[in-house]
Amino acid sequence: MNDRPEDTTEEAPRDSLFRAPPLAEQERMVEALLFASAEPMSVAEMAARMPHGCDPAEAVQLLRRRYEGRGVTVARVGDAWAIRTAADLGYLMARETVETRKLSRAAIETLAIIAYHQPVTRAEIEEIRGVSVSRGTVDQLIELGWLRFGRRRMTVGRPVTYVVTQGFLDHFGLESARDLPGLKELREAGLLESRPPGEDAPDLPEDETGELFEDEQEPGDEDEV
Amino acid sequence: MNDRPEDTTEEAPRDSLFRAPPLAEQERMVEALLFASAEPMSVAEMAARMPHGCDPAEAVQLLRRRYEGRGVTVARVGDAWAIRTAADLGYLMARETVETRKLSRAAIETLAIIAYHQPVTRAEIEEIRGVSVSRGTVDQLIELGWLRFGRRRMTVGRPVTYVVTQGFLDHFGLESARDLPGLKELREAGLLESRPPGEDAPDLPEDETGELFEDEQEPGDEDEV
Amino acid sequence: MPTFSMGTVMADTPVPANDAQDWDAVASRRAEEALVVDVDGFEGPLDLLLNLARTQKVDLRQISILALTEQYLAFIEKARAMRLELAADYLVMAAWLAYLKSRLLLPPEPGEEGPSAEDLAAHLAYQLERLAAMRDCAARLMGRDRLGQDRFVRGMPESISTARRVVYTAGLIDLLQAYARVRTRDDFRPYAMDRESVFTMEQALDRLRPLIGSAAEWTDLMSFLPQGWETDPKRRRSATAANFAAALELTKAGKVELRQSETFAPIQLKRRD
């Protein structure tokens, strides 16, 4: 690192008393400064910290070349310099954690009704469930890609209908919604719950209890949510 | 960068679906991660962010060699890694230093005793210093992130023990507690025992002798640091 | 605490060193310092002993404990003569050293129990050596290239974030069961009738919702028990629990407030406006 030719000082004869460190050493200094600084640093700021006679402008160019293609780069920020993550590696900094959550009872029931009765209107779903269906539940199911709007029903008010999607079929491993077993088959398969409604409420995970207010309201209160 | 030989995937047949990026690319990733983080990062943390099949442990070794003699260095801190400025360039940044709270002599000595004798109980620290340890001393060291509680000693009263932390290693530039200066000499001189070498200390209560075998480790063996 | 001169007793002088750097510097300056001692500058009797031991100008392993004992006792005497208040542990140490001195000077009594005077002296010498070693270690530690002083961390750390993505799990069985549940709700209603002593939370909710409108003032939750459920203990218990759970739900929904002045005191409910 001290292999810089002797002539460096000749370039700055006025500083002969304070011989500047070799350029390679200046590059090290700039590297440390840019690394540790909390703000981008101008050449003047670097010079103020470096020994007399240093040329941070040249050192920063050396450093910049050294970091070409590396995991970080020496970037120009206005008239200052900063070390930044290489753009192509930004994704490493933002890790995604996947959290699995159970679908709320309201959502799964709504989904089931739509799967069995599609195309089905909101009023019909509410009639079957005996409670209103909140916009949030439908939105969530649409966002999950399991629900979409079908054609409007040709009745008074032309209400929208809901149908399940291919994504729904894929997720639940179904060829088509018609393959869903009927009530009789469900009973035979032991899938009918033998508990009266309401009793299973205490078993529900915490966040599902809230649904009583968010979701299951008497039809008519619906839009207050 | 893509000159990785074809047979690499054969080495890890279970990962054949997810071919790891070339090692040079992994080195870039580790570089970006370590530059981005102010805290030391463990190999496991890096691996969690890097693509499947990466080997950050090997990549970090490459990176460490690359930065030898540079303005910043790749430092091992316990079982983690961090980039820190080279110690010889500290004077450049010194003005950035926020005046840290001054440590009392009691705190410094207590810290040294814990580092060299860990895991160590309060009573043992007091024995060595010949004075009681004030609560403020330990609190201050814990607040600095240099101390934490180790396992309780399996003796009467099950006293808590103190051990030093990763933050301690980072602060004092130690790769591990084994690298404490003079540790080997002290051990050889018998100065890390609770009594002079060869002395039986017949006046000690019986249950304290067992502890030497059950729980106490030499500082160098402390893997938790 | 006053400072005072120790005359010839002290050849080098401990200085109250309250921080690392001063302390480091002190080590080198010590020899030239004036012979002024601040008792507060000592970190206990062992520290004082160690400083006295250093005046013997020998390796701590060759220290004369007898001479050290005399030095310590002389120090304490002097301090007392100057009417300095000494902490109890200095006096305890003085007493112990006086005992040790007599044991070292007198021939051992036959049949004497416990460790010999030489063992005690050796242990004291060991303690001093160990303390000196730890001092040295502390100085070496503080003299290392320290973070924030000689070595620096990244000044512009990037946020390394961990985003949370929620994946909903729902299997076919969940779907089928949900449908079955919805479609067979009516079938089950008669079963609920069998459990005549059970008041469910949903029932309590249905009952409370219209009632809370009138609870503009704090009202005892127990007053909301349905008729016919107040006397029979079994029914009362169930209705109380259901009412309480329902009240919590209503509180969570922001419809009512609950309060209880102390443990076991009546729980009171008020409408939230």
Image (cartoon, coloured by chain):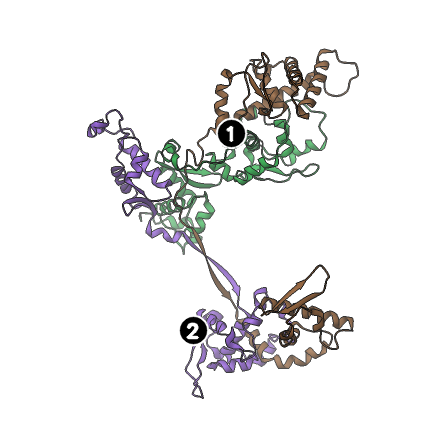
Chain colours: A purple, B green, C brown
Examine the rendering and report whether any part of residue A28 can be seen: no
Which kind of residue does numbered mark 2 sit on? Gln
Circle 2 chain: A
In the rendered image, the vertical position of residue C109 relative to residue C46, given as above or below: above
Real-space Cα distance between discs 1 and 2? 71 Å
Picture coordinates of residue C256, whole percent (x, y): 61, 69
Using the image as rendered, state which of residue A54 and residue A60 is in the foreground.
A54
Within 10 angstroms of label 2, few (less than 14), some, or many (20 or more) residues?
A: some
Asked whether disc 1 touches disc 2, contact meaning CB atoms under 8 Å apart, the reply is: no
Left or right side of A95 for C198:
right
Left or right side of A144 for A184:
right
Q: Quadrant of the N terminus of chain C?
A: top right
In the rendered image, the vertical position of residue B18 relative to residue B222, given as above or below: below
Picture coordinates of residue C257, whole percent (x, y): 62, 66
Question: Can you identify the residue that label 2 sits on?
Answer: A166
Circle 1 chain: C
Using the image as rendered, state which of residue C56 and residue B9 is in the foreground.
C56
Within 10 angstroms of label 1, few (less than 14), some, or many (20 or more) residues?
A: some
Which kind of residue does numbered mark 1 sit on? Asp
Question: Can you identify the residue that label 1 sits on?
Answer: C19
Q: Residue at x 68, y 79 (%)?
A: C191
Picture coordinates of residue C229, whole percent (x, y): 74, 75
Left or right side of C106 for A100:
left
Count of marks overlaid on the render:
2
Q: Residue at x 71, y 28 (%)?
A: B204
Q: Secondary structure at mark 2?
A: helix
Q: Quadrant of the C terminus of chain C?
A: bottom right
In the rendered image, the vertical position of residue B161 relative to residue C204, given as above or below: above
Picture coordinates of residue A1, whole percent (x, y): 30, 30
